[in-house]
Amino acid sequence: MPSLVTERIESVKAGIVGASSFALAESAFWLAKIVINLALFNGTVTETAGLLEGNWAIKLAIGAVSGFLFGVTYRYVIRSDRNSHLNDGAVLAFGLVRGLALIEQNLSLSELLSLGGLVLQSIICFAIARSALDLAIAHKKIKPFV
């Protein structure tokens, strides 16, 4: 049986993989939004200024923390049995909690639809983090929880 220190190190490694892959996925979505805004507004940066001036660094940091917590938790969820329902459930649970937390206000239908896209984005980002973690575990860079 591995020592407690070994388990903690593996959990931190899983957290780092989760945080970095989630942050990269979140950054890709952010860059895609900028490119789409530039394309829709014929290359003018004025309409894209909102994305550039926003608090994207804070959102990225929060996303990285979410990814870190997901990585640590996912390592414990998957254990040694390969139950795809647990794997998918972890992604869906984290994605829904992160995405639905934004919808706790009284919003109009159009605002809800816009936030629905954020829920989907969150689920996709966690799915990418899961893939990175599965790959790291398959290549024995991270040991699964025993």
Image (cartoon, grey):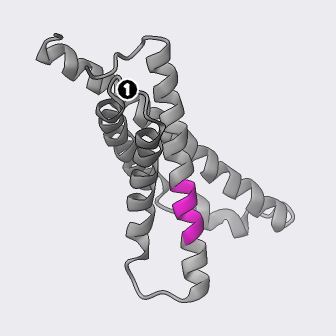
Secondary-structure class at tag 1: loop
Quadrant of image for the C terminus:
top left
Compared across the picture, whether 14 is left or right of 46 comes to left
Magenta segment's dominant SS is: helix
Residue 64 in magenta?
Answer: no
User: Which residue is denoted by mark 1 in the rendering?
Assistant: 81
| Highlighted magenta segment, given as a residue range | 116-122
Give the percent coordinates (x, y) of residue 145: 28, 23
Locate residue 11: give its quadrant: top left
Which residue does the image show at 55% across and 38% down from the upper left?
128
Q: Residue furthest right?
A: 42
Which residue does the image show at 46% across and 28% down from the upper left?
133
Q: Badge 1, how many Cα within 10 Å: few under 14, some, many 20+?
A: few
- In the image, 54 versus 108, the foreground residue is 108
Give the percent coordinates (x, y) of residue 34: 69, 56
Quadrant of image for the N terminus:
top left
Residue 107 vs 97, above or below: the answer is: below
Give the percent coordinates (x, y) of residue 50: 60, 67
